[in-house]
Image: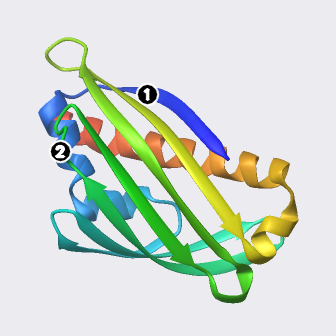
């Protein structure tokens, strides 16, 4: 499954990048996130509860960040296990482009693979749920960063 989109955030690029590296901001923006722990500058550990169709699962997972191109670009890869519900793994490439002094365009391309009960639900349901979750995350993220700018 692949997802790609872009969102305009009314904040300077350095502030957007800093927010993307702030576990507290990420935890409040990730749908269903119960816990997000920054283990190092390149490692995060997460606990997320998701409902996909009739299946509700608690995922525990690890995320690795590659910040070699930061703050203009970075990538992340991760995997999570939801017990009997299944497992997921994937990654995303994110680019940040300044569009004036107080506007940043965030673009992402993500790929994910799932297995277990979740994979049996059908690709349409999985794809639409993934799109909704990604849209919800980025809307929340933009709102939080925009509030931070105006506060």
Residue 37 on image: x %, y %: 27, 76
Q: Could you tell me if residue 42 is visible in this image?
A: yes
The mark closer to the camera, 1 or 2, is 2
The residue drawn where x is 62% and y is 81% is 82
**SS type, badge 2:** loop
Q: Which residue is mark 2?
A: 68
**SS type, badge 1:** strand
Q: Residues within 10 Å of mark 2 (few under 14, many from 20)?
A: few
Find the distance from the CA under tag 1 to the CA under tag 2.
22 Å
Nearer to the camera, 150 or 40? 40
Quadrant of the image occupied by residue 121: bottom right
- Residue 7 has which mark? 1
The residue drawn where x is 15% and y is 38% is 15
Quadrant of the image occupied by residue 45: bottom left
Residue 141 on image: x %, y %: 37, 45
User: Which quarter of the rendered picture does the C terminus lie within?
Assistant: top left
Residue 88 drawn above or below residue 7: below
Q: Is 125 displayed left or right of 88 in the figure?
A: right
N-terminal-most mark, 1 or 2:
1
């Amino acid at each position: 499954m692949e997802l790609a989109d872009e969102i305009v955030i009314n904040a300077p690029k350095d502030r957007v990048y800093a927010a993307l590296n702030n576990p507290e901001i990420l935890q409040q923006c990730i749908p269903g996130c119960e816990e997000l722990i920054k283990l190092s500058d390149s490692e995060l550990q997460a606990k997320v509860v998701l409902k996909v169709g009739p299946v509700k699962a608690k995922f525990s997972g690890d995320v690795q960040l590659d910040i070699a191109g930061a703050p203009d670009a970075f990538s992340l890869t991760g995997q999570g296990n939801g017990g009997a519900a299944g497992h997921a793994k994937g990654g995303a490439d994110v680019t940040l482009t300044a569009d004036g002094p107080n506007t940043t365009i965030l673009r992402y391309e993500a790929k994910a693979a799932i297995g277990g009960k979740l994979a049996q639900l059908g690709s349409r349901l999985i794809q639409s749920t993934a799109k909704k979750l990604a849209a919800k995350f980025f809307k929340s993220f933009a709102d939080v960063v925009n509030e931070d700018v105006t506060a």
